[in-house]
Image (cartoon, grey):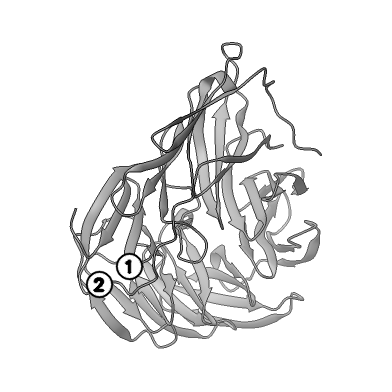
């Protein structure tokens, strides 16, 4: 299906104000464009200089905002300029890493922001109107310039998930995958009478749990580019409350067994490699997150961070208020106290970094230059070595 616009552009005027390019659109009232304001930066800000975190962190700036539903769409030194995306109820803006000044902004007055995420140099946003969260917009992460706009073929609230060159809009009834280069549809997936769990995107493909009426739940791996089923297996019977953790080197699933958990790993053909118990406490399913860093699966159950070999062998656990983030040779953990840098394979604390009091609830952390970006339910906080 071709990407299409839902409005007609009758004429535009471009004005440059203080380094921002403002899009002024004289169209019929009530249309999408007349209710859209875009202030784009004239040039992409320079990337921050990569450096170690300082010995102690202080708050540089903060801004209220709406966190992404899927979590962890945070900027990195290698993929983004020194701009931090902050979402609101009707739009999103890019703020300077250095002082929080607004670099660009995009507002939809006739639509509510539904969800957002980052993918390389793009900010990807879904908006909701009367027909659900169907409008998708891709903005340049550095300047806010709109790259493309289209509608998704999902008629209810969606959550956005991103991988290299791929955006997936998902709800419990289906998935729609889009090419991030232009917004064209790659594939859709859904089964009548079936409920889909949140997908996990990785090097092996798109993994998810599928529950259909009258049948046992299944673990499904979809091809990233075609959306076709590579394999489908019964959910591991070694526990309850299954959650897909990763789809990178192997596909790993976490299930609960009493007060502990079991990690089951599968290779890219669907062959089960191992099922190993690991002593972690479960949190809420919506807060589970995972990554693979330096060959180690580092997951978060909503209450604890744990590490396991890609074949499922448990390595270590630690309390955490959010998912760990890879930072060169170490992983960075946020907790109720100071931050800790740990060896990903042994869990040994390499460095402890004092910081202002952290969030009691879930928080996602990311690294830009020598600064730390955190997103909580209250908004975005940037920490660095110099106070504002």
Say how many tags the image has: 2
- Residue name at image x 51 percent, y 37 percent: 114
Asked which secondary structure carries label 1, the reply is: loop
Q: Name the residue under label 2.
A: 54
Please say whether residue 290 is visible from this viewpoint: yes
Nearer the N terminus, badge 1 or badge 2? Answer: 2
Q: What separation in Å lies between label 1 and label 2 (alpha carbons)? A: 7 Å
Picture disc at residue 125: none
Position of residue 295 in the picture relative to residue 49 (left or right): right
Asked which secondary structure carries label 2, the reply is: loop
Classify residue 274 by image quadrant: bottom right
- Residue name at image x 49 percent, y 50 percent: 44
Please say whether residue 362 is visible from this viewpoint: no
Whole-percent x, y for residue 317 in the image: 38, 78
Name the quadrant of the N terminus.
top right
Position of residue 133 in the picture relative to residue 103 (left or right): right
Whole-percent x, y for residue 281 in the image: 39, 69
Q: Name the residue under label 1.
A: 370
- Residue name at image x 79 percent, y 61 percent: 229
Up the image or down, 94 lies above or below 366; here it is above
Q: How crowded is mark 1: few (under 14 residues within 10 Å), some or many (20 or more)?
A: some
Q: Residues within 10 Å of mark 2 (few under 14, many from 20)?
A: some
Position of residue 203 in the picture relative to residue 342 (left or right): right
Classify residue 282 by image quadrant: bottom left
> Of 302 and 113, which appears nearest the observer?
113
Classify residue 338 by image quadrant: bottom left
> Of 258 and 193, which appears nearest the observer?
193
Whole-percent x, y for residue 2 in the image: 80, 38
> Of 219 and 306, which appears nearest the observer?
306
Q: Do the residues labelled 1 and 2 touch (CB within 8 Å)?
A: yes
């Amino acid at each position: 299906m071709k990407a299409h616009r839902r409005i007609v552009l009758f004429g535009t005027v471009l004005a440059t104000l203080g380094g921002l390019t403002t899009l002024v659109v004289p169209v019929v009232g009530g249309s999408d464009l007349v209710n859209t304001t875009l202030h784009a930066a004239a040039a992409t800000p320079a990337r921050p200089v990569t450096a170690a975190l300082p010995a102690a962190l202080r708050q540089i700036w903060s801004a209220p905002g709406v966190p992404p539903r899927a979590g962890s769409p945070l900027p990195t030194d290698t993929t983004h300029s020194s701009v931090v995306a902050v979402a609101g109820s009707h739009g999103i803006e890019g703020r300077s890493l250095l002082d929080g000044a607004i670099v660009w902004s995009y507002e939809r007055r006739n639509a509510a922001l539904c969800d957002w995420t980052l993918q390389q140099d793009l900010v990807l946003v879904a908006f909701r109107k009367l027909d659900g969260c169907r409008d998708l917009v891709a903005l340049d992460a550095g300047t806010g310039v709109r790259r493309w706009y289209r509608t998704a073929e999902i008629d209810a609230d969606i959550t956005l998930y991103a991988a290299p060159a791929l955006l997936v809009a998902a709800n419990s009834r289906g998935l729609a995958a889009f090419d991030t280069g232009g917004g064209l549809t790659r594939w859709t997936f859904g089964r009548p009478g079936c409920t889909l769990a949140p997908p996990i995107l990785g090097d092996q493909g798109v993994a998810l749990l599928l529950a259909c009426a009258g049948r046992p739940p299944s673990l499904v791996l979809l091809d990233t580019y075609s959306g076709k089923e590579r394999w489908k297996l019964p959910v591991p019977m070694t526990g309850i409350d299954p959650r897909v953790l990763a789809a990178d080197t192997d596909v790993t699933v976490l299930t609960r067994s009493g007060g502990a958990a079991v990690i089951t790993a599968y290779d890219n053909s669907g062959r089960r490699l191992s099922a190993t118990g690991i002593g972690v406490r479960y949190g809420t399913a919506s807060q589970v997150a995972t990554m693979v860093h330096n060959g180690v699966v580092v997951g978060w159950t909503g209450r604890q961070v744990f590490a396991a070999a890609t074949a499922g062998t448990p390595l270590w656990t630690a309390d955490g208020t959010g998912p760990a983030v890879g930072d060169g040779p170490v992983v960075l953990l946020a907790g109720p106290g100071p931050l800790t840098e740990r060896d990903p394979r042994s869990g040994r604390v390499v460095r402890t970094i004092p910081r202002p009091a952290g969030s009691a609830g879930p928080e996602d952390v990311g690294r830009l230059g020598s600064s730390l970006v955190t997103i909580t339910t209250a908004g975005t906080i940037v920490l660095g070595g110099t106070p504002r």
